[in-house]
Amino acid sequence: MTTLSGNSYDRSIMPLARDQCICLRKIDYSETSQILLLLSREHGLLRVIAKGAHRRTKAGASNFDGGLDLLDLGEGVFIYDSAKELSTLTAWSLREGHLDLRRTLRPIYLAQFAAELVGNLIEEHDPHPETFDRLVRCVDDLATPKLEESFLAFELDLLRDTGYLPELESCVSCSRRVMGDPAVYFSPARGGVVCRNCESLIPDRQPIDVRLIRMLQSLLSLPRANGAPARLPRLTRHQTDPINRLMIGHVEYTLGKPLRLRRYVV
Ligand SMILES: [Zn+2]
């Protein structure tokens, strides 16, 4: 955390903090203000109000560069109190507005869905600097041909870090390893793979190509650099859609609610 030097009065009762942040959700609040969900690098998820975010001075400037947009990456200054539900964002300086990403729909849907996943799977005020760095990298990659594999790798790391990754090696019913099996099933409710002997016992099981499970396992065990796979294989939606569907189904079951943007992604 960086604490800004202010006057002693401010310092004693209102710690000001400066941190890199990505905007995960925004609601315009009154004509000039915004309520935002930010993922900050060092302070975790933050709900903030940006008062006067849309207000501009005659010189065209505001403390918020004219307001935040989804997925904007920048440096925020906020009055930080972890006991409060809503912190106050006092200044924002945009570092990356991702204009490349915003030209076509698929990258923007994947980026917004990544933001929705992060906003739902991470607890507030619980710092996840690695997730922050991976989200920054993933959003950058979504503007390139590497978008499908980058999104999937980000999703898997996020699920693993937050304890939402399903069981992919052994049957969730009988614990037998399934990798040699010709047919494998997956249960979103039980959170993992199901073997052929047990499939009749698990009502929500869905057949899944065993090659996709193997691909998932190899993605998870790729050599890593700076907390993310160093080099990803190229993947198409033909490969990633069935996996995303299973992962999202499992997350929705575990959260007990549908994810808003899933229909735009799979
Ligand atoms: Zn079994």
Image (cartoon, rainbow, N blue to C red):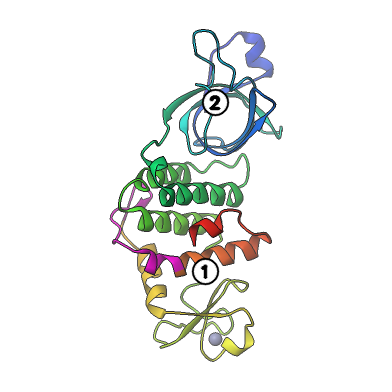
Quarter of the rendering containing residue 99: top left
Task: Give neighbour class at mark 2: few <14, some 14-19, many 20+ (Cα, 10 Å).
Answer: many
Q: Residue at x 62, y 78 (%)?
A: 204
Tell me residue 120's x, y (percent): 61, 50
- Disc on the earlier residue, 2 or 1: 2
Q: Quadrant of ligand 1?
A: bottom right
Q: Residue at x 41, y 28 (%)?
A: 95
Tell me residue 158's x, y (percent): 49, 54
Question: Magenta includes 23?
Answer: no
Q: In this view of the protein, can residue 81 be seen by the observer?
A: no
Secondary structure beneath disc 2? Answer: loop
Q: Is residue 258 left or right of residue 161?
A: right
Q: Nearer the viewer, residue 86 or 106?
A: 106
In the image, residue 109 sits, relative to residue 76, either above or below, namely below
Mark number for residue 67? Answer: 2
What's the residue type where badge 1 is placed? Leu
Residue lying at the far bottom of the rendered structure: 197
In the image, residue 90 sits, relative to residue 73, either above or below, namely above
In the image, residue 68 sits, relative to residue 125, either above or below, namely above
Mark number for residue 246? Answer: 1
Measure the alpha-carbon separation of dots 2 and 1: 36 Å
Quarter of the rendering containing residue 140: top left
The answer to whether mark 2 and mark 1 are in CB contact below 8 A is no
Tell me residue 260's x, y (percent): 61, 54
Segment colored magenta: 224-241
